[in-house]
Amino acid sequence: MTLTGFTMDHPYLNSVVLLLIVLLVAIAIGTVNAIFLLGSLVQLAVVDLILIIIGIFLLTSLEWWGKAGYTAEIRLAQVPLFILPIAIALLSLGQGIRVIAPAAILAFAALTLVVGFAEETYFRGLILTTLLPTGTIRAVILSSFLFAAPHLLNMLGGVWDPYFTVVDSFAAFGIGITFAAIRLRTGSIWPLLGIHALYDFSSLISLGGIDVPAQSPQDLIMSVFFGIVFVAYGLFLLRARETEGKGIRIPDDY
């Protein structure tokens, strides 16, 4: 059986395999980091660079660059769809900016673009496309759940506060719903790469690094609130598109 045949015939199994690739790469590089003490930022960069290489191989082998949203153009009328997620992404800056050195800012910008490309390629590219034959809503929810699951790894090694990790995983699920909806509404994955990078970049320069200390109850509640907002917004985008009778924009070569 070919890779394409396996992917199309076994969407659930294939989506789990893709998630396992993400997890195994993260665990393997995390083990290397524990031995050689490379640092959490270097670990993150190496993990996502490896995932990008594997993702490019898979997209090329499956001939899914179009299906994953890498060849679609954004229309001006679609720009308002991005306003809410961009606005929420910028809220992290309200806590102040701890990183002001130009070199550090450029390094964080490069890192977050790498992370955005890797994660969007897998979750809104490969996994969402794999699951679409099972139904749009089901594909959106399952791909978002699979996107949220790896965030729980952040509590390993004490990098993130455990309570915040759980709350952030729920917020990630909500972000996944909104991102998947935008991906299907526009047909393009490119805006999501930029918005994803913006989320991570604003958090990094606000926190001063990747570690997340214990958060106040108000901050935890706010993260849950934003997760709910993202779920509602994503489902609204999907529902509004169906109500308009225009369907979901899936590439012609699907």
Image: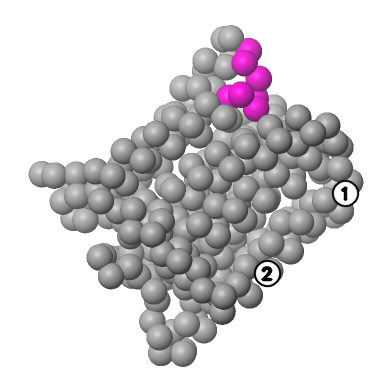
Whether residue 200 is visible, yes or no, is: yes
Q: CA distance from mark 2 to mark 1?
A: 20 Å
Whether residue 141 is visible, yes or no, is: no
Q: Is residue 92 magenta?
A: no
Crowding near pointer 1: few (<14 within 10 Å), some, many (20+)?
Answer: few
**How far from the left and from the top, in percent, is residue 55?**
38, 40
Which residue position holds label 2? 83
Identify which amino acid the numbered label 1 is placed on.
Answer: Gln
Task: Give the vertical position of 54 relative to 186 (above or below).
Answer: above
Q: Is residue 42 magenta?
A: yes
- Between disc 2 and disc 1, the foreground one is 2
Q: Is residue 38 left or right of residue 240?
A: right
Q: Which mark is residue 62?
A: none
Which residue position holds label 1? 95
Q: Considering the numbered disc 2 on the image, is that residue within a helix, a strand or a loop? A: helix
- Which residue appears at 39% of the width and 74% of the height? 249
**How far from the left and from the top, in percent, is residue 157?**
65, 24
Classify residue 68 by image quadrant: bottom left
Task: Give the vertical position of 215 relative to 9 (above or below).
Answer: above
**Magenta stretch bounds:** 37-43
Q: Is residue 237 left or right of residue 219?
A: left
- Which residue appears at 67% of the width and 45% of the height? 200
Quadrant including the N terminus = top left
